[in-house]
Image (cartoon, rainbow, N blue to C red):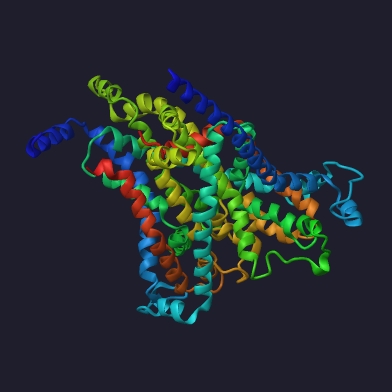
């Protein structure tokens, strides 16, 4: 009895100590959290101030006016609608094709037992991890040669399709890996009953597997959209006309061009970040589960 | 099942496919495989071969065998390579010893649902969704000569600290920016992993009088093996391949050499040479270890 009491007392003592400690930890993490979002807050703050005002009174001055003029200016002077359109031309087809191809391979590998299944999966997963720089030179040559041979020099090089294809080729490795581990969690009986009923492979894929894959495809789609949207390298090296570049790659040049007008640049950067911020606030669950689908293999 | 029985089973299964089904299966695997091989594996092999040649990249007939010359040039005649490699190693050290552990620590604390954990999670996760291009611009606002930080230190443009130009400090400035994103990324991955750890295990440990550190080390950490592997691989690969953030700040100039930008300088634009291919191969060889470790860990159960 007395031992029990003793234990209980030491437990409460421990709990109290923990509480104080927790408060300390929470405060510490809290201060850093504010430091963490400060750069973003500062950018938005900068974007709301007129350039003239900052120029005359310095960055720390209390603003005379706050308005959205910089945003209107950025949209027209930086050609942002054009760059967003370019981004859509690359991102939308790339995400759909990646998910489509990834789901095809994942479907075959997880539902039919061929002896090269593991090899195939290994090939795709490893391919996804190769450095982009390692494949660049031959891809570049291939695009140019193919374009010349077919009489359309800009078929793949300096064209959104070239960028789409390289994204698809790379990311399909990740999609295959994630979707095949997801499919392993879907009971085999569902497929077996479809096969027993005499469904063709095609029907099995479109009518049975695709509907079951929908949550995984949604998560992966959100993640892929963010990745491809944020890509900088491929659109930079596979496109020569700035007017065809997506917004992320175009920012590099815009930064140089508008280097003195920080407030305008701040507005431009904020607009460029907007789609990913929307994803962050609205589709956060999908983003996170897309990331972790692959890591928590069932 | 004996191996012959298995074979028979397989054969009968394969025979069960109709011609249409076989075509479908062939197309399902063949079309994606074609693109993947054509644009990833074949170019990778070609780059490795090209790294042993001289070629200006114009006509295929002008390719000349160079043996190890490109590598010799890099190792013995290019000081920028060693400087870049040094920067990558510092990058890796910083990520492995500071940024990644901080991300894990954060995830652990936030997972314990300390006060304000929802806000903290959002704050640390926010930079993860931003592109590195936007990240570079945002930090430039803070660190430029007439920016926020210099203003805070009371320095005007003439005697401002050059955060990106001063060679003694610029790597740490870049690493701070890179960590701003990396810590949140690791936190996110770890947090998802922690949710799958049975909370009863932890309670049992704390009832047994284990300290928090002991609980983490002996109970939580070992049960998170798959996430740990991913975190390690991401840490190494991101440190070796760092490119975007440096490029957005320095352009393709040699202002801050790391392997990623060295490859870029040699493969893109006018001065294309197969030295760039050799750089890419070096980058690949350096990252091959973590890739294999990752594949082995993930496919162990499949291969058996």
The picture places residue A179, in percent across and down from the top left corner, at 39, 36
Image mark count = 0
Quadrant where the image shows the C terminus of chain B: top left
On the question of residue B67 being in view, the answer is: yes
Q: Provide residue B269's location: percent of width, then percent of height.
A: 56, 69
- In the displayed orientation, state which residue is furthest to the bottom: B77
Seen from this angle, which residue lies furthest top?
A1
Viewer-side residue, A65 vs A211: A65
Horizontally, residue B124 falls left or right of residue B59, namely right
Quadrant of the rendered image containing residue B257: bottom right
* The quadrant where residue B154 appears: bottom right
**Residue at 61% in and 42% down:** B124
On screen, residue B281 above or below A14: below
Position of residue A80 in the picture relative to residue B203 (left or right) = right
Viewer-side residue, B83 vs A257: B83
Q: Residue at x 64, y 65 (%)?
A: B170
User: What is the x, y in percent for residue B63?
Assistant: 39, 76
Q: Nearer the viewer, residue B40 or B259?
A: B259
Q: Which residue, as the protein is rendered here, is positioned at the far front?
A: A2
Quadrant holding the N terminus of chain B: top left
Can residue A149 be seen by looking at this rendering?
A: no
The residue lying at 48 percent from left, 21 percent from top is A5
Residue A146 rendering spot, x and y as whole percentages? 44, 59
């Amino acid at each position: 009895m007395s031992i029990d009491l003793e234990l209980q007392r030491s437990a409460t003592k421990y709990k109290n100590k923990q509480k104080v400690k927790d408060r300390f930890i929470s405060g510490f993490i809290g201060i850093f959290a504010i430091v963490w979002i400060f750069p973003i807050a500062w950018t938005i703050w900068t974007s709301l101030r007129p350039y003239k005002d900052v120029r005359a009174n310095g960055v720390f001055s209390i603003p005379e006016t706050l308005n959205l003029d910089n945003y209107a200016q950025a949209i027209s002077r930086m050609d942002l609608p054009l760059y967003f359109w370019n981004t859509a031309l690359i991102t939308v087809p790339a995400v759909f094709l990646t998910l489509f191809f990834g789901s095809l391979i994942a479907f075959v590998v997880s539902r039919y037992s061929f002896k090269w299944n593991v090899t195939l999966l290994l090939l795709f997963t490893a391919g996804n991890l190769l450095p982009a720089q390692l494949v660049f030179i031959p891809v570049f040559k291939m695009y140019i040669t193919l374009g010349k041979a077919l009489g359309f020099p800009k078929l793949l090089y300096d064209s959104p399709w070239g960028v789409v294809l390289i994204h698809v080729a790379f990311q399909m490795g990740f999609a295959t890996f994630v979707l095949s581990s997801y499919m392993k969690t879907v009971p085999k009986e569902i497929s077996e009953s479809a096969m027993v009923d005499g469904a063709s492979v095609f029907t099995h894929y479109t009518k049975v597997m695709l509907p079951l894959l929908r949550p995984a495809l949604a998560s992966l789609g959100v993640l892929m959209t963010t990745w491809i949207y944020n890509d900088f390298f491929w659109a930079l090296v596979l496109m020569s006309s700035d007017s065809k570049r997506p917004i992320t790659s175009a920012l590099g040049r815009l930064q140089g061009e508008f280097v003195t007008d920080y407030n305008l640049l701040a507005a431009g950067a904020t607009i460029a970040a907007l789609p990913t911020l929307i994803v962050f606030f609205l589709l956060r669950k999908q983003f996170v589960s897309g990331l972790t689908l692959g890591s928590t293999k069932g | 099942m004996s191996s012959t029985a298995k074979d028979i089973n397989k054969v009968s299964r394969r025979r069960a496919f109709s011609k249409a089904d076989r075509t479908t299966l062939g197309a399902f695997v063949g079309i994606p495989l074609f693109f993947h091989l054509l644009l990833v594996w074949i170019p990778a092999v070609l780059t490795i071969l090209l790294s042993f040649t001289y070629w200006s990249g114009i006509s295929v007939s002008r390719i000349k065998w160079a043996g190890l010359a490109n590598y010799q040039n890099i190792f013995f005649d290019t000081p920028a390579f060693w400087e870049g490699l040094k920067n990558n190693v510092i990058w890796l050290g910083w990520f492995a010893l500071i940024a990644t552990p901080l991300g894990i620590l954060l995830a652990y604390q936030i997972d314990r649902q300390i006060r304000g954990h929802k806000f903290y999670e959002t704050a640390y996760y926010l930079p993860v969704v931003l592109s590195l291009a936007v990240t570079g611009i945002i930090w430039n606002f803070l660190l430029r000569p007439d920016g926020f930080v210099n203003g805070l230190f009371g320095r005007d443009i003439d005697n401002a600290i050059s955060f990106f130009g001063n060679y003694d400090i610029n790597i740490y400035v870049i690493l701070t920016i890179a960590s701003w994103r990396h810590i949140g990324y690791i936190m996110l991955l770890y947090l998802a992993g922690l949710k799958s750890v049975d909370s009863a295990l932890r309670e049992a440990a704390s009832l047994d009088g284990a300290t928090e550190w002991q609980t983490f080390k002996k109970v939580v950490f070992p049960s998170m093996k798959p996430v740990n592997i991913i975190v390690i691989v991401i840490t190494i690969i991101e440190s070796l391949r760092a490119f975007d953030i440096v490029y957005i700040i320095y352009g393709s100039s040699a202002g801050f050499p790391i392997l990623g930008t060295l490859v870029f300088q040699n493969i893109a634009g006018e001065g294309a040479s197969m030295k760039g291919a050799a750089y890419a191969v070096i980058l690949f060889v350096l990252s091959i270890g973590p890739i294999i470790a990752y594949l082995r860990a993930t496919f162990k159960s499949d291969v058996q």
